[in-house]
Amino acid sequence: MSGTEPLLRVEGLVKRLGAQEVLKGIDFVVHRGEVVAIIGASGSGKSTLLRCLNLLISPDNGRILWKGREVGWVERGGKRIRATERELLPYRTEIAMVFQSFNLFPHMTALQNIIEAPVMVLGRPKAEVTAEAEALLAKVRLGHRKDAYPHQMSGGEQQRVAIARALAMKPEALLFDEVTSALDPELKGEVLAVMRDLAAEGMTTISVSHEMGFVRSVADRVIFMHKGRVRESGDPKTVLANPQTPELAAFVESVTD
Amino acid sequence: MDWSVITGNAGLLGRAFLTTLWVAGATILLSVLLAFPLAVMRDGRIRALRWTAAVFSWAMRATPALTLLFLSYYGLPQIGIYLDAVPAAIAGLTFSAAGYNMEYIRAGLRAVPATQYEAARALGMPGWMILRRVIVPQAIRTIMPPLTSNLTLVLKGSSLAGMVAVTELTGAGMALISETYRPFEVLIVIALAYLGLNGLLIRLQKLVERRLGPGAA
Amino acid sequence: MDVLLRQFPRFLDAIWLTLWMFAVITVIATLLGLALALWAEGRRARGLDLYTWVFRGLPELVVLLFCYLALPYAGIDLGSIGSAILAFVLVGTAFHAEIFRASLRAVDPRLTEAARSLGMPPGLRLRRVVLPQVARIALTPWATFLAGNVKMLSLASAVSVGEVMMVTRQSLAISQDPLTLILFAGAVYAAIASLVMIAETLIGGWMTRRYGPATGGT
Ligand SMILES: Nc1ncnc2c1ncn2[C@@H]1O[C@H](COP(=O)(O)OP(=O)(O)OP(=O)(O)O)[C@@H](O)[C@H]1O
Ligand SMILES: [Mg+2]
């Protein structure tokens, strides 16, 4: 893949939360169509990293390059200053995020949740978006639930609606933050199946996940984080089979069931 | 601004301030004394008493305090009860406050686990002793915070007494204004007096919450 | 009883006046309270604190007298109904602002985050995501305040607004039967207050059935 600019390039990312330096200089690149998995113990900074990538929180140091252009900072009067919330919005529509706790809007039906942003943010015609949304619901196997409100759906159904909601923005990459960990074991499968479908279609995804089966079989690359740093990365089959650091060895040990 | 209205009538305003304290203080004390047995009745075993207490609580909370005040000032003489302005005002305000206090006390009593009643009964304690020695000491924690926050409402409510010819702060103010035509000075002083008292009550409320609230030792 | 019957047309007018004053005050004070709560988010909380402390701490009657007796000296003569509306709006705004401030804080921050991740700008987020949650969270405290506030309208009689309590007081002067008159007036306010609470129960129940329990999020 050399020669082409990666979709996403992260350089020396640092983020402090309170007194603690949660990210201590993260570097990696993601190419179009790649499926990247981020693993690591609780508190290692995985969620913080994803929220930085979406610029829901702004990094204290380092650069994020999206399609070769730096995001989060703008040039104004010859000075480099932080972009405002409004200036970040176009970027956020290109890189969508799915959360551990679903975060569906409780006062909207499944269908309304999905069409909300394409209609209100992108200003696309409602009829067209609705047709797409129905197709997306069918794709996540929820065609029959389009008029259900979030409280009437199971966690697995809600999470699949949330994925459809993210896809409706036609993003170029998807961020998944432990999207299955709030779900009962029997519901995890239906969400993982959707994620597998997306990978097979060539969607670029960056997922924080503790599902080692999924990481092994679906991810093109795994990134192991420890205390705010990338400790190991590479092909999941190799990396997970032969940990080079005691931390990864201990982590693999702890999550293998 | 001409503050001589205030300085010249300092004595009147001072007495009015004391009347406000007296009306509000008496209302608080009497309304709690009245509300307590009603709260016990409300969840008690005798059906007629339960209903009486429930209707009382609803009626007192749904009716304007001013109505209750007029009832005791203009209405009671009709059935042969003649009260002076101050006692009539205190009576009206007491009934109004009792409706709310009843609910706080009831919620507090209910918050004591049922097992405490059982344990006390197993020890052979009579009903009133269970209440006094076991339930109330535990319930007081939940009862006091809303009760003290209700004090600010009682203080504000005492201003209504001014409308049945009691010369408490507001009543005295109205009289002074119609005499001197200096509403700004008079109302500012009265407002400051109320806000000062209110500040003290909020202090008291914080103190009670710290002493009794959740997390207190 | 005969006085009540003879005065009945006047009572009807008075009930009507009470109702529309209540409606006008509620609409204005609710909108102002919401606007203040939004304005005070973050750093400007102090100004709102002072305002709500003053207007929640003063007796309504004092505010009313100020609007009716003092403002004309400053060249603002609103008449009796106008002063009463102004006074209750000033007081109501303070209470509503506190209710909405607490409700805004109770909205699940994860919903806001989800909206941001979808690229929704702040205004859109507020309108489409945050305010619908606020409406649910604030419903009960808002209705409870209103039910209490209806009763406070009886104070407007102090500045000779011809609402229910005013007509009652005037009728008292010519009646042998003050008890009936006063009880009738009390019943009118109690009925309006009860209607507010019943409406709250119905709307709250409908929302819970449709949107699930109000937790601020999913
Ligand atoms: N708002 C905050 N203020 C201060 N510290 C925070 C904040 N949010 C997170 N942290 C800290 O940052 C560290 C990393 O948190 P993060 O949520 O990124 O971890 P994580 O790897 O996603 O863990 P998990 O697997 O439990 O989700 C933790 O130690 C956490 O306590
Ligand atoms: Mg996390």
Image (spheres, rainbow, N blue to C red):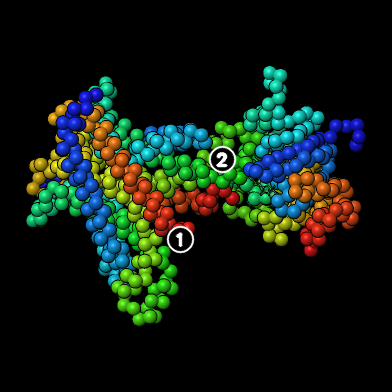
Residue drawn at x 62%, y 39% as measured from the top left: C115
> In this rendering, is residue A29 above or below B185?
below
The kind of secondary structure element at disc 1 is loop
Q: Is residue A24 left or right of residue C165?
A: right
Q: Residue B176, how many percent across, how many down?
A: 16, 33
Depth check: C209 or B14 in front?
A: B14
- Of the residues shown, which amino acid type is indicated by label 2? Val
Residue drawn at x 43%, y 69% as measured from the top left: B113
- Of the residues shown, which amino acid type is indicated by label 1? Ala
User: Based on the displayed image, in which of its 4 quarters is residue A243 positioned?
Assistant: bottom right
Circle 1 residue: B217
User: Based on the displayed image, in which of its 4 quarters is residue C159 positioned?
Assistant: top left
> In this rendering, is residue B207 above or below A134?
below
Mark 1 vs mark 2, CA separation in Å: 41 Å
Q: Residue B154, how many percent across, how many down?
A: 28, 48
Circle 2 residue: C129
